Amino acid sequence: RDLHSFPTRRSSDLVRRETLVAAVQSALESRKRQYQLRQQIEALQQSEEQFRALADTMGNLAWMARPDGYIFWYNQRWHEYTGTTLAEMEGWGWKAVHNPTDFPKVMEAWRSSIREGTLFEMEFLLRGRDGAYRWFLTRAIPVRNSEGEVVRWFGTNTDVDELRQTQQALRQSEENLNAAIGASRTGTFRWDPESGEFLEFGDNLDRKSTRLNSSHLGI
């Protein structure tokens, strides 16, 4: 009976050893995966910290949002311009610095971009800490993972107030010039000196009734 039981005990011991080895290997693999995951998380955190430090040096206002549009971070330039804190702006608090008249259109466009996962681009007014509004060109791009899912949004607000003022001044200057020309009954045209052809006549000149040649130009 002892001779017959010896192989059984040996087989049982072998099974226990193999089970123990498998358990140890599994624990080691699990520990290795945890270590790799921790390294990845630390690398991502370091990368994000570096990115935020870089974004804080930007002249533009910048921010990041979750896939649903909830803004969780602004760069220092945003807080300096608006005079607000993260606690005041987090989530949907940014609507407080928008022009109430424009806000519904901004919100509609933003929600559409979130829903479709497409670029958001729009010009609108933002209120500064002094209470004055300035025009900003805002762009937000979706950041996707390897599966193509939107994992966050990164947005910037570029001050274009002076550019818009310059464009408006140029338009006003052109309107004033056209009005002056009309009042003086002076004609305008574009002429190609190589071909001698008139390319374009102003509204105050009639191509059919006007006879122009090089002698009129002093050539």
Image (cartoon, helix red, strand yellow):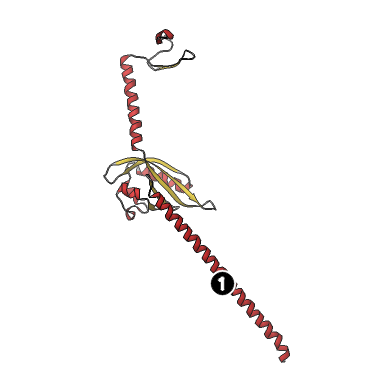
Total labels: the figure holds: 1
Q: Amino acid at mark 1?
A: Ala
Q: Which residue is mark 1?
A: 27
At which x and y percent is residue 147?
A: 54, 53
Q: Is residue 138 visible?
A: yes
Q: Is residue 24 above or below residue 218?
A: below
Judge the density around disc 1: few (<14), some (14-19), many (≥20) Cα neighbours within 10 Å.
few
Q: Is residue 219 above or below residue 161?
A: above
Q: Quadrant of the N terminus?
A: bottom right
Q: Quadrant of residue 159?
A: top left
Horizontal side of residue 94 vs 193, given as left or right:
left
Residue 144 in percent (x, y) is at: 50, 51
Work out whether 17 lies above or below 120: below
Residue 206 % position (x, y): 41, 13
Q: Looking at the rendering, in which quadrant would you find the C terminus?
A: top left
Q: Nearer the viewer, residue 39 or 204?
A: 39
Q: Quadrant of residue 202?
A: top left
SS for callout 1: helix
Q: Nearer the viewer, residue 104 or 181?
A: 181
Could you tell me which residue is drawn at 71 percent across and 91 percent down?
A: 2
Residue shown at 61%/75% (left/top)? 21
Q: Residue furthest bottom?
A: 1
Q: In the rendered image, is residue 65 in sight?
A: no
